[in-house]
Amino acid sequence: MTFQVSLVDFITVLPETIVFGMGLVIVLFELFGTGRNTRNLAYLALLTLAVTAMAEVRLFGQGLVGFGGTIGADDFSTALELIFLIVTTLVVLLSIRYLEDRRLARFGEYYALLLFAVGGAMFMVSALDLLNIFIGLEILSISSYILCGLIQADQRSNEAALKYFLLGAFATGFLLYGMVLLYGATGSIKLSGISAALARPEVFANPMVVFGLGLMLVGFGFKVAIVPFHMWTPDVYEGAPTTITAFLSTAPKAAGFGALVRILTEGLGAVSVQWTPVLWVAAALTMTVGNVLAMQQDNIKRMLAYSSIAHAGYILVAVVAGGREGLAGVLFYLLAYAFMNTGAFAVLILASTKEKERVTFADFQGWGYVEPVLAIAMFVFMLSLAGIPLTAGFAGKFQIFKTAVDKGLVWLAVIGLLNSVVSIYYYLRIVVAMYMQPAGPASLQERALPSVPVYLAIAASVAAVLYLGVFPATWIEASINSAAVLVAGP
Amino acid sequence: MTILGIPILSLIIFFPLIGVALLLFVDRNRPELSRWVALVTAGATFVLSLPLYWWYDGSSAAFQMVERVAWIPAWGVTYHLGLDGISLFLVLLTTLLTFLAVLGSWSAPEKHVREFMISLLLLEVGMSGVFVALDMFLFFVFWEVMLFPMYFLIGVWGSERRLYAAIKFVVYTMSASALMLVAILAMYYLNFRATGRLTFSLEEWYALDVGLPAQYWLFAAFALAFAVKVPMFPFHTWLPDAHVEAPTAGSVILAGVLLKMGTYGFIRFAMPLFPEATWAALPVLIGLSVIGIIYGALVCMVQPDMKKLVAYSSVSHLGFVMLGLFAINTQGVQGSVLQMLNHGISTGALFLLVGMIYERRHTKAIAEYGGIMKVMPVYAAFMAIFVLSSIGLPGLNGFVGEFLILVGAFQVSPTAAIISASAVILAAIYLLWMYQRVFFGVITNARNLTLKDLPAREIAVLLPLLLFVVWVGVYPAPFLNKMDASVAAFIKRLEAPHQMAGPYPARRPGALDLGGLAARTVEQR
């Protein structure tokens, strides 16, 4: 068996190649570049992301498959990769002032690691066999571990990195074990091969398939923080640099869901009877536990960490509902979440400096009258996270729960929507602090240090949240078309 | 159809946004200018909405001044507006009360006046939208979005326990409407399975005959959402908190318009979409209405706080509105729709009056007053008329509404009508007793000696309401005529399955087995 490597193979992985290549260039720049100004590296990263996004747009609708069917560039992966690129662009915009303020600016590798992480995520969702998925996941994870521990002087940052690393390594073990069992049962690591093998009754009945599936779900459950594998999330999100928290709560999650959905539909669609009920329960638990615990937090980063668990639950509802419409719900929700979540972190980042971190709700007392524009932006993000109409979050939830009702998952929809009512309580707590509680001490009444890139990120996120909320039609249709490459039926 | 080529309903709904946009550019240190901008905007909106009364053709039950544009084609959502004889008056009530609320809060909120006015105007957008939306998705959007300006009104400008009241208001309403959203989605797919069209259009949904057990579930979800809003006993507990903590303008809007969104929801959605479930639930609904009427009245008797008294009287009065609706006959429903307006006007006025004296003395406790009539004769006169209107004195508006409701209810359930009628006596007791303690006798509290009577502005706020109170009391025909056809259509829609299948329709196949939604169209019947 020989491989004919042709140009198509390389075009398929063009976006990944650009990102990884430029990541290496940034490392070299950092080493040999002039001066200590990492701003140029940030601009280089932004340029890379923009060029990659253009490459992705060109790949849209091509449905390429390369390297002997091990990696592809279909509309589903391309859509997800565009979401990663959006998140990373926003995160880079947030990072410039943050790094300088925290005396972290000498870490030029920061941007390289960010690019490696996003490259890993892209690799993960475009991979068509288990091994490539695993490699992508590892690149993403290892870059993330380092980024978490970036603030060497801060114990919590170190704790976050170590915790994330240990539990991540565990999860990887589970995942790999599951993959091995699946390979043992089906004789293939390619998703198409697995799917074909499962058509044979003796393979279908092999208990190793179910075991492998279970272990893989555990592994992915850790990665995307599904209850009961969510314990690491709040500590890691709290300890990591806020910019990295913004990244972690969105991009790896989206990548995890992308790969999970691909494995479940392209590889294990035949055994959906086995995984559907499990994910049903996991979705209900994840939404409920995430929301209930988020209610009890006083630290906004921790609140957002638990809320990200709850949002993973909503997305899981879409996975359970499945079909073209359900997977479109996954894509659209991830897009909406990218903007609203990163936007909320952006406001948080702008409101804090090294000297004065604003992390609790109380720190925001009276802020609505000090920074009216930023406060309104925060209000919009909170409304969207809570799923109030005319915001992206509502459009996403609507697509998800609409499909759930269509597929007969009425109770899951009821649980989900009641959960989003619970979430209103804690999302509004920051609004209460900003507008309704008496102003805090004078030190909290100072205005935020201006930063043009952060303003840009916030403005873009607000615009996107409202646009996707008021006129979702185009993007819903695009999501449905992108999801259609994985599943035919509605 | 639009008037003179102008989409008049959209214009009325979104006109306040012009004021909001202007307010954003007003210097926050010039509260006076903010007030004027808001007043002119709200006034202009009211003037714009007035001609609706003449443009609306009362002889037809069809939705009029309809606007329909595709909005989210992927979901079959349209921007679909229309007016009928019921929503006509609710829109007018909204624009009038918003205007008066702005005028009535000329001196009350001292801080963040600009933001206060922005909230009021945004609230007006949401409320008018709710009453004219004919697409369930659009309705839901207005219904939810409108909560947040109200949330701010209570939470920022309210009194001591405002945070608690504000979040309770939002969470109560939202929990109930979450279930309604599931029911809306279920209807959406029921309709799709039956007709093959993905649409949220209310008129298409009216044509759908939903299978029986499914009707019960869906009706329950819709009815719960609206019952919380009305509020019907036992879902009323958010109301006293919200009313008492809200600033005057907030209370006026809350009592005057927001509660009507609940009753309107029953008329427009819950009952006509699910007629058979309505008939089946009627005994319970009538029972809860009667309990609400009596319970609200009894609780009023022991209130030491004027605002709380007026708040609880709303529970009682809205019980009447619901009772009239559930009578499902011409008198009952007409009385009910009329009583919605009456309650908006009378209770709105009472909240304004309580707010006026609160601004002077900063207390709402009845015990703090006594003998006020001597220092504030004009105030006392206005209060007397609105109290009597609220009681239902013949010759004033409240009597016409309650009388019609009781006539309607008597035909259905004499017991319910008789028990409810006793609440009219209770209302006379608690309101007149309150009036007596506040206004009659000698002034016992020295601080009341220096109270200033109403200036021209406050009289100007109350006069339009007074005019309405007398007008409806003496000559209600102009109001009843416009709603005749729509009320008849509502009753006809509800009676159609009822007459066909006897008093309690037999159970039919077509279950909402939660997996596969099933429905039959009218054509298949």
Image: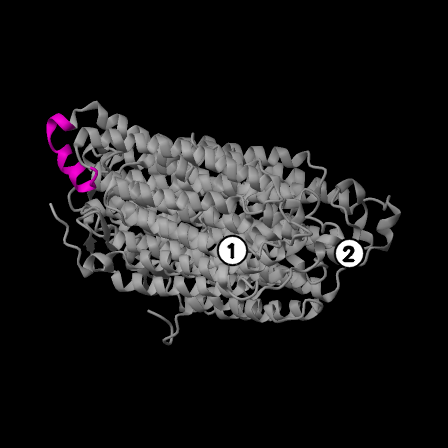
Q: Main secondary structure of the magenta part?
A: helix
Question: Furthest residue to the bottom?
Answer: B4
Report whether B157 appears left or right of B472: right
Relative to the observer, which residue lies in front, B369 or A355? Answer: A355
Disc 2 and disc 1 in contact, CB within 8 angstroms:
no
Relative to the observer, which residue lies in front, A113 or B102? Answer: A113
Relative to B476, residue A159 above or below: above
Residue with the mark numbered 2: B377
Q: Looking at the image, how many numbered discs can be counted on the residues?
A: 2
Q: Disc 2: which chain?
A: B
Report whether B451 appears left or right of A203: right
Relative to A17, residue B289 above or below: above
Q: Disc 1: which chain?
A: A
Mark 1 burial class by Cα count in 10 Å: few <14, some 14-19, many 20+: many
Look at the numbered disc 1 and give the secondary structure of its residue.
helix
Relative to B371, residue A288 above or below: above
Report whether B48 appears left or right of A130: right
Residue B476: image tag: none
Find residue A429 and report its horizontal and vertical position in percent.
59, 45
Could you confirm whether marks 2 and 1 are on the same chain? no
Residue with the mark numbered 1: A380
Give, as a three-letter code, the residue at label 2. Pro
Q: Is residue B328 visible?
A: no
Find residue A34 and report its horizontal and vertical position in percent.
53, 66
Q: Residue at x 45, y 53 (%)?
A: A114
Look at the numbered disc 2 and give the secondary structure of its residue.
helix
Question: Which of the 4 image quadrants contains residue A470?
Answer: bottom left
Rounded to the nearest whole Å, what is the CA distance between mark 2 and mark 1? 48 Å
Question: Which of the 4 image quadrants contains residue A414?
Answer: top left
